[in-house]
Amino acid sequence: MKTTILIVLFAFMVTVTIKTVAQGSGVKANPRTRLQSKEIATERADQSLPSGGGQPGNKLELKGVEGEIYISENWSLGTIVLRNGGIIDNYLLRYNILVDQMQFIADKDTLAFASPKELSTVTFDNHLFVYDSYQTGSTIRFGYFELLEPGKNRLLLKRTVTFEMPDANNPDDEEATKYYIDECYFISKPGKAANKIMCNRKSVLSVLNNHQDDINEYMRITGNKLKTPADLKKLVSYYNTLDE
């Protein structure tokens, strides 16, 4: 079914309105469809994906792991908390990694929030998402993150599509396209854009750069090497107890 683009206004709780854009009818909407939102379009302007994959003789380093572009592929009933405290709990939700959109179904259309800054949290299928700013080079961007560790300092996970490889015989077949997903970790400190970190001591402590003596003692006693996401969660949780 051909994708239809239309602007939709929904009146939510306490007279708050969140703009939405229809991506098409039903659950098989084209995953490439972008919001017709100047704000979102600007944020993703330079996130073009490599092309030419699948051509004979090309030696490509495919960063990331092959996977699905939706969380979740099946629609899940979830809860949306607005920044003004309003709650919406009657929508089926999923997250589209490729276009960084939180999507839901309304009136048999697949929709996405065009004003995600009005959202506080989005929860479904045991995932909790926030929409926040982050630093990339010298630029501040906004996007969806999964919240792994809450608190004054937050550990966030951002998934991105690093490569898409169309079927050489059917390049226009979206369902046959292979997507490679990368997972990046960020730490968000109060009043600042989130900073990307690596799973190693130097990278993490360059962001969590206070309470150095306490952190060193914690790492000595626990043996935490900051090599895994679980290690990161434990350190951020401990750091928050020092930074209260």
Image (spheres, helix red, strand yellow):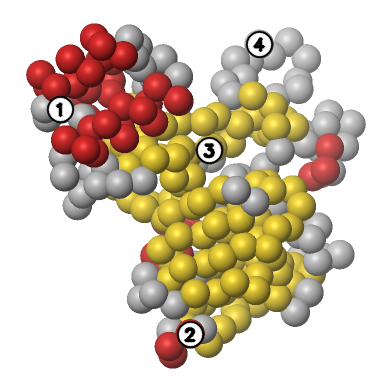
At numbered mark 1, what does the secondary structure look like: helix, strand or loop?
loop
Earlier-in-chain disc, 4 versus 1: 4
Between the C-alphas of marks 4 and 1, the distance is: 40 Å
Which mark is drawn over residue 159? 3
* Residue furthest right in the image: 169
Label 3: which secondary element: strand
Would you call the spot at circle 3 few (<14 residues within 10 Å), some (14-19), or many (20 or more)?
A: some
Circle number at residue 52 = none
- Horizontally, residue 231 falls left or right of residue 239, namely right
Q: Is 35 left, or right, of 206 in this rendering?
A: right
What is the spatial separation of the Cα atoms under label 4 and label 3, in whole angstroms? 24 Å
Q: First in sequence: mark 2 or mark 3?
A: 2
- Residue 96 seen in render: no
Q: Residue at x 75, y 32 (%)?
A: 178
Q: From this view, report whether residue 115 is shown above or below residue 73.
A: below
| Circle 1: residue type | Asn
Residue that label 2 marks:
13
Amino acid type at circle 4 is: Lys
Q: Residue at x 40, y 22 (%)?
A: 231
> Which residue type carries mark 3?
Arg
Q: CA distance from mark 2 to mark 1?
A: 41 Å
Please say whether residue 184 is visible from this viewpoint: yes
Please state the horizontal and vertical placement of residue 229, each as a whole percent of the image: 45, 25
How far, Cα to Cα, is label 3 from label 1? 25 Å
Identified at 31% across, 14% down, the residue is: 222
48 and 76: which is toward the camera:
76
* Number of other residues with Cα within 10 Å of mark 2, as a class: few under 14, some 14 to 19, many 20 or more: few
